[in-house]
Amino acid sequence: MPLPFLVNPAAPVPIFQQIADGLRAAIGRGTFPAGSLLPSVRAIAEELGVNPNTVHKAITELERDGLVAAERGKGMVVRPGTRSQARASGDEAVGQQLEAAARLAVAAGITPERFEQLARRAHSAATQEGDR
């Protein structure tokens, strides 16, 4: 199964964080339900075209947050009861990025209405990018 997200090397968000956020969102949506295995570090790295150490760092973050756990001989397994936790973490990550974008918008003199238009356009572009 292909990953339900992409990474953007030109984005200001570090790639490991984009991967962690993408996996967190996939857990929150149920793409990776409780008890399921995440793809291997190597498989994720190959699919996204990134260094395996970058993927490992992202998965370590998810493990630290209690969303996944290593099972000997299997790999990283999504822990039970983590779907709502993953959604809340995803909301927090999006909120932080929007807050940073809003500070930039205020500094650039962008009105709240225009900021909302830009946010909607970016969301639409990201949705279309994910559909490819």
Image (tube, rainbow, N blue to C red):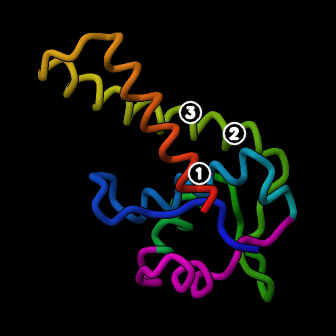
- The amino acid on which the numbered mark 2 sits, given as a three-letter code, is Gln
User: Contact (CB < 8 A) between labels 3 and 1?
Assistant: no
Find residue 47 and report its horizontal and vertical position in percent. 56, 80
Q: Position of residue 125 (x, y in %)?
A: 48, 45
User: In screen coordinates, is 15 left or right of 21?
Assistant: left
Question: Is tag 3's residue or tag 1's residue first in the polypeptide sequence?
Answer: 1
From what the image shows, is residue 100 above or below residue 117? below
Question: Disc 2 marks which residue?
Answer: 85
Quarter location, residue 31 = bottom right
How far is disc 3 from disc 1 in space, using C-alphas? 14 Å
SS under mark 3: helix
For disc 3, the neighbor class at 10 Å (few under 14, some 14 to 19, many from 20) is some
The residue at 37%/36% (across/down) is 97
Q: Which one is nearer the viewer's eye here, 121 or 51?
A: 121
Q: Residue at x 28, y 31 (%)?
A: 100
- Element on which disc 1 rests: loop
Tell me if label 2 and label 3 are in contact, CB under 8 Å: no
Q: Nearer the viewer, residue 6 or 21?
A: 6
Three-letter code for the amino acid on which mark 3 is drawn: Asp
- Residues tagged 1 and 2 counted as in contact (Cβ below 8 A): yes
Which three-letter amino acid code belongs to the residue tagged 1?
Answer: Asp
> Which residues fall within the magenta stretch?
36-54
Name the residue tied to disc 3. Answer: 91
Q: How many discs mark residues in the rendered view?
A: 3
Mark 1 lies on residue: 65
Q: Which mark is residue 124?
A: none
Residue 22 lies in the magenta-colored region: no
